[in-house]
Structures are given as C-alpha cells and as structure tokens.
Amino acid sequence: MASSKELECAKYEVDDEGIAWVTFNRPEKRNAMSPQLHYDMVEIIAELENLVDAKLIVITGAGESWSAGMDLREFFRATDNDPAARHKSYWAHRQWTQFITASNKATIAMVNGYCFGGAFTALAACDIVITADDATFGLSEVNWGILPGGNVSKVFSDLTNNRNAMFYAMTGRTFDGPKAVEMGVATLSVPKDKLREEVLIIARELMEKAPMVLAYTKQAVRNVGDMDMNMAYEYLATKNTALFGIDPEGTRSKGMTEFLDNKTYRPGLGPVKRDD
Ligand code: ACO
C-alpha cells in the first residue's frame, strides 16, 4: 500500500495501483455526517488532491451504509443554539464537497448501502456513481421537518428531471440502485457482490487515460452545464487550447502521430498508449 490515514470518522488507503479508497467510517451511526466527519473529509480530500501516488479517488462507506446524511444529533440538534459551531461544520461540508467537484482526479462514489439527504451533495460531486442494486436512496428531509438544504435540492434537481426531483423531495420515498440509474442519479447499478469489481474495472479504464486530458474533460463537462451556447463554444475552445499547452504527456500530438502516421491504433477504440 502506497499510503494511508485513519482519522476519527473517515480514512483512506491508496493501493499499489494508485486508487485512493476513502471511507466514511462511522458504521455504527450508518456513516451519518457529524461535524468531525466533515473536518476529517476536508483534511483527506485536500491531502489526496496533492498526493502524487493517488491517481483516482473512490468514496465509500464502512458497514451497510454509504451515508445516512447529516447527523441529526451532532450536526443539527447540538448546534441549534450555536450558529458559529453550525457554520463551522456547514462550511467544512461545503468545502470538501466542493473540493471533490473541483478535483483534477477522477472521483467515483461506490454506494454500498443507505444514501440519504445531505449525502446527495457528496454523491453529486463525484464524477461517476456505481451503486449496489439494493442500496437505498432517499430525500428524507420532508419526513422529519426540514427541506433538502445543504444544496441537496439544487444538486438533485440538476441530476434528474424536475418531475423526479419534486416527487422524491415531496414524498421522501426511497428508491434503489436501478431506479437511481434510471433517474440519472447513479451511473451504473450492480449486484452488491460485484460492486468493488465493477468499480475496479472503471477505475482501471480511467487510469489508462492521460491524467491532464481526463481532468480537463471532466471540468469541461461539469462547467458547460451552466453556460449558454455561445459561452460554451468560447470556453471549450479556450480550454482545449490550454490543454494542448499544458498536457505534460503531449497526448494530442502522440495520438495523431500514432493514428495518422504510424497507424498503430484507432482513437475510436481506446486511448493512445502512454509512456511507461
Ligand atoms: N443522524 C444521526 N444519527 C443517525 C443517523 C443520522 N442521520 N442515521 C443513523 N443514525 C444513528 C441512529 O441514531 C443509531 O444510533 P444509536 O445506535 O446510538 O441509537 C444508529 O445510527 C443506527 O441507526 P438505526 O436507525 O438503528 O439503523 P437502521 O439500520 O435500523 O436504519 C437508517 C438505518 C434507515 C439509515 C436510519 O438510521 C435512518 O433513517 N437514519 C436517518 C436517515 C436520514 O433521514 N438522514 C438525514 C437526511 S436529511 C439531511 O441529511 C439534511
């Protein structure tokens, strides 16, 4: 193992392939997000972003839950009369989920069980979501007296269509992995005993791509969503020019040479081979 860290509520291990396995680690509380979990995640995600050995980040949960959302006791009740403490953990939650969104590394949510409420912000921040068929998703906020804040209403509406967002936010009904895929909330749903295997397949596939090209690609796809057509044209042209200049592997030139001159491979069928 290349490196690892275990904090009070979260941990990571970077394996020999360069996959950083990040785990919400409060299984006895179904990985509910306490203030400490948020502080731990800020530390972990910030550290992994600059850890050269960590090429890709997978986020999962210990035990039978991905995350049961915000901790009602520690995040909410304990800070109801302490706005400064509430802001501190709210800010930490916002920070680490935005760190994931902005990460240059590919991020995969490996959803092994419950995913409720506030957990959707982290889920949406990940590039790819692989879920177990029998995972349970839900916007339970309405059930216990709040609306889906912490940007859950926003990210959920962005992921799925308005009819789905409204229905699941208003009813608080749960849904499983296949339904999450059907709605656009998850990427793939597989039987639980195949979950890690499927994540590994996708992680390895992503790690065959040139890292800078992958980083720019994910940033481009994420950012154009909020742009009008003209802005997107301009942004993507500029971003591609920047990528050409900054990619240390010179992937574009290599790809063209191998395809057009050497005729060694087909860009439509896979990535150009990277230098060892
Ligand atoms: N906040 C605080 N504690 C929690 C949370 C939570 N979100 N979720 C679970 N726990 C705690 C329970 O209080 C319990 O603690 P205890 O052992 O000290 O009594 C422990 O985790 C186990 O929970 P159980 O309910 O006993 O576990 P079970 O497997 O039967 O049910 C389930 C799991 C369905 C996830 C249930 O715990 C639950 O409904 N949790 C709340 C889910 C939720 O609505 N989250 C908030 C979304 S809103 C938001 O995030 C803003």
Image (cartoon, rainbow, N blue to C red):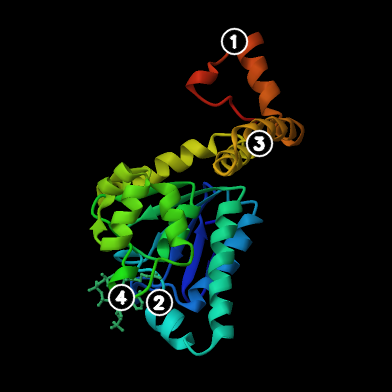
Q: Amino acid at mark 3?
A: Met
As displayed, is residue 204 above or below residue 158? Answer: above
Measure how far apart labels 4 and 3 are at the Cα level: 41 Å
Q: How many neighbours does mark 2 have within 10 angstroms: few (below 14), some (14-19), or many (20 or more)?
A: many
Q: Label 4 CB, ligand 1: below 8 Å?
A: yes
Q: Are marks 1 and 2 in contact (CB under 8 Å)?
A: no
**Front residue of 245 and 18:** 245
Mark before the other along the chain sequence, 4 or 3: 4
Q: Amino acid at mark 4?
A: Trp
Q: Amino acid at mark 1?
A: Lys
Residue 254 in picture, x, y percent from top left: 67, 22
Q: Label 1 CB, ligand 1: below 8 Å?
A: no
Ligand 1 in which quarter = bottom left
Q: Label 2 CB, ligand 1: below 8 Å?
A: yes
Secondary structure state at the residue bearing disc 4 = helix
Measure how far apart labels 2 and 4 are at the Cα level: 13 Å
Mark before the other along the chain sequence, 3 or 2: 2
Residue farthest right in this picture: 245
Residue to which mark 1 is pinned = 263
Measure how far apart labels 1 and 4 are at the Cα level: 62 Å
Mark before the other along the chain sequence, 1 or 2: 2
